[in-house]
Image (cartoon, grey):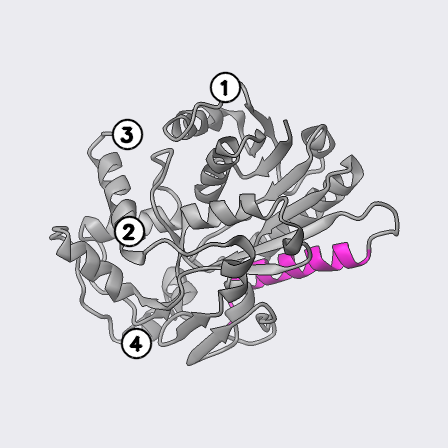
Amino acid sequence: MKKVLVTGISGFVGQHCAAELLKKGYAVRGSVRSLSKTDEVTIGIKKEIDPKGNLEFCELDLMKDAGWDKAMEGCDYLLHIASPFVVKVPKDENELIKPAVEGTLRALKAAKKAGVKRVVLTSSTVAMQGGKHGIVKLNQDSWTDVNEKTVTAYFKSKTLAEKSAWEFIKNQNVDTKLELVVVNPGPIYGPTLTGNLATEAMDFFKKLITGKVPMLPRAYSVMSDVRDVATIHVAALENEKANGKRFIVTSEKPHAIQEIAQILISDGYDKVSSKLAPTFLLKFMAKFNDEAKGMLPFIGNTIEADISETMHTFNWKPMPFEKTVLDAAKSVKAVLNGNT
């Protein structure tokens, strides 16, 4: 049985990737920052599939060398998912950039040393869209301009981490080559397996359905279902056509934040507001509020993406957007009602 190391297994994407790997017959070793999180992850994954002894855990820190070699022992593949994610703009951008870049390089160096065949790296469309305004059309050659003044620390962290990974792959010695595939999702929604609502996506839905979001930003973007993201991560491990490529995993067309609200209202979520916030107000708030500042790159823009190569390479079609929204809300509602 082939074994995959999944970094950040306790995260929103990590837990779904682990479940998908087990369904596809892989053994999984998942990294967490603290082993105290393992029960939560195991219980969540068991809702999808019985691991039958094929799930184990290790402790890793993106900023420390300790444990990486041991974690990689006996692994055929690596899903490097762990990376800091916050909308709120930090006081020091290196709080996000350093762990993202250094963690990626630690993971790749350890994978190379252990003889791992292929790494699938979780990047983002924010590594593609930053510094562009208006109607932004993304494809596999799109990159964020990290020197553009509106580009936030999170956009920089994902861009620089992905670029450092490609640079590492390009500069390998001529011995056995480590392969790399990169997955670029948009904003990720869908159900939680563990019931942890502390992630940005889950927290947004929690606030939305409990009436804590009085006004919505005017923003349109291609969006992603966490189950689609997991499907492509796992499919990319052994697909020969995938090596050396970036794959955008999003909806085919952009959706408005307001559309999420309208889907929920139609399904009976009566506390949800569909009222749009004036763009000038959000820009004004961004002067004083770090979370509002983090939203600025999305406001007033329409993010489109060409996902044809992803669909063709993996014979895949994205989940219907309405299903993503309703499954996310149902999942959050279950947690709030204590039914997890």
Q: Amino acid at mark 2?
A: Lys
Q: Secondary structure at mark 3?
A: loop
Crowding near pointer 4: few (<14 within 10 Å), some, many (20+)?
some
Q: Is residue 311 magenta?
A: no
Residue at (67% x, 61% y) in the render: 163
Q: Which residue position is annotated with label 1?
A: 52
Where in the figure is residue 15, as x and y percent of width and height? Answer: 46, 37
Crowding near pointer 2: few (<14 within 10 Å), some, many (20+)?
few
Number of the front mark, 4 or 2 = 2
Q: Which residue position is annotated with label 3?
A: 340
**Mark 4 touches mark 2? (CB < 8 Å):** no
Range drawn in magenta = 151-171
Where in the figure is residue 129, as x and y percent of width and height? Answer: 51, 70
Q: CA distance from mark 1 to mark 3?
A: 22 Å
Q: Earlier in the sequence, mark 2 or mark 3?
A: 2
Q: Earlier in the sequence, mark 1 or mark 2?
A: 1
Q: CA distance from mark 1 to mark 2?
A: 30 Å
Q: CA distance from mark 4 to mark 3?
A: 38 Å
Q: Secondary structure at mark 2?
A: helix
Residue at (76% x, 55% y) in the render: 168
Residue at (33% x, 69% y) in the render: 285
Q: Amino acid at mark 3?
A: Thr
In the rendered view, would you say 19 is above or below 184?
above
Crowding near pointer 3: few (<14 within 10 Å), some, many (20+)?
some
Of the pair 14 and 178, the residue shown nearer to us: 178
Q: Amino acid at mark 4?
A: Thr
Q: Which residue position is annotated with label 2?
A: 323
